[in-house]
Amino acid sequence: MGENVSFWESLVVGHPVCVEWNQMTEGSFYHLSSILFVLGSMAGSGVFGLLYGYIFFALSFFCTCIWAWLDVCAADVFSWSFILLVICIIQIIYLAYQLRSVSFDKELQDLYSTVFQPLGISLSVFRKIISYCNAEVVTLEREHCYAVQGKTPIDKLSLLISGRIRVTVDGEFLHYIFPRKFLDSPEWDSLRPSEEGTFQVTLTAETKCRYVTWRRKKLYLLFAKNRYICRLFSVLIRGDIADKLYELNEKVSLDSGFRFDIRLPNYYHMALPEEAHSTTPSIHVQDVFVKKSTPNRL
């Protein structure tokens, strides 16, 4: 214990006191190194933020190497600064490789610019989404079916790039699917990864359509390896389902003039006037919402 006390005493009060400060400056390279280090410490988050920080750190350690070699002539200062410089250069090369130029088709580039880039998704992540799952861009001719009710298996996920898709059930029109919307988001969300099923609606191209499609199993493998991409698709798919739900809700009304909210049927029943309970309300546009044969499509 006494040795510890003497050590701390010697460390705090036992060292020589700086009676006179050195009036000589350390040189321009030392000050430039400090300035660059401060700028590197201001880097933000993300890949671009890391690249910005490591570039300034590398410049800072390079200036420190020059200062240690020419002005101080200190081998230990030069060695440590050089090691840190090499580490920063390796990090810069790695980050530059992650951000290397990736050539996409114009359709995929437009898809990235309109759907993924506004969400802050980097090109490197988008490349994984496209390349890892072997995403394909497919053409669907006019009046050709993407899926047939009760026959087509749910084994993929597709996002419409151009054109317009008509959704029907038992020959009755349900709604349209427009570009930048998923073709089968309700079907995807209705099944667990280990489950199988078939479409409960028919999807027909009203015009010549182009869509990008991912295989279901490969997409789940990517989700298992990358939780960030899994959360991203979860947000996109559920947002797409919410849009479809809202669109369907806008098309449903009653003879009495009340709008039927398909999300809150019980609340609607309680909100009806007394005289309205004596009559059976009829739902216009579609009666698919009361059919048990279409559980997978909103």
Image (tube, rainbow, N blue to C red):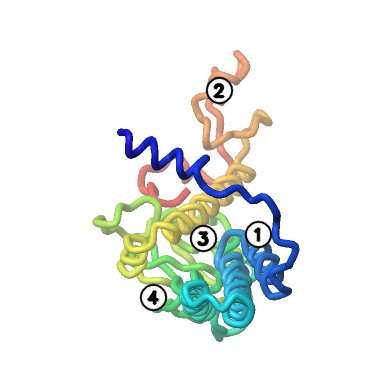
243, 71: nearer the viewer:
71
- Sequence-earlier tag: 4 or 3: 4
Instruction: Kindly identify which residue carries mark 1.
Output: 42
Who is closer to the viewer here, 135 or 275? 135
Within the image, what quadrant is residue 164 found in? bottom right
Q: Along the polypeptide, which appears first: circle 2 or circle 3?
A: 3
Tell me, yes or no, whether the two marked residues, 4 and 3, touch with CB atoms within 8 Å: no
Mark carried by residue 279: 2
Tag 4 secondary structure: loop
Closer to the N terminus: mark 2 or mark 4? 4
Q: Quadrant of residue 196?
A: bottom left
Asked whether the residues under the numbered discs 2 and 1 touch, taking CB atoms below 8 Å apart as contact, a structural biologist would say no
**Depicted 291 relative to depicted 119: above or below:** above
Q: Dot 1: few (<14), some (14–19), or many (≥20) neighbours within 10 Å? A: few
Number of labels in the image equals 4
> Outermost residue, top direction?
274
Residue occupied by mark 3:
167
Q: Position of residue 66 (x, y in %)?
A: 61, 80
Residue 184 percent across, percent down from the top left: 45, 61
> How crowded is the residue under tag 3: few (<14 C-alpha within 10 Å), some, or many (20+)?
many
Instruction: Assess disc 4: are there few (<14), some (14-19) or many (≥20) residues with their C-alpha within 10 Å of its C-alpha.
Output: some
Looking at the picture, does residue 65 appear above or below residue 122?
A: below
For the residues labelled 2 and 4, the Cα–Cα distance comes to 56 Å
Q: Mark 1 or 4 closer to N-term? A: 1
Establish if 185 lies above or below 206. Answer: above
Identify the residue position indicated by label 4 in the image: 132
Q: CA distance from mark 2 to mark 3?
A: 31 Å
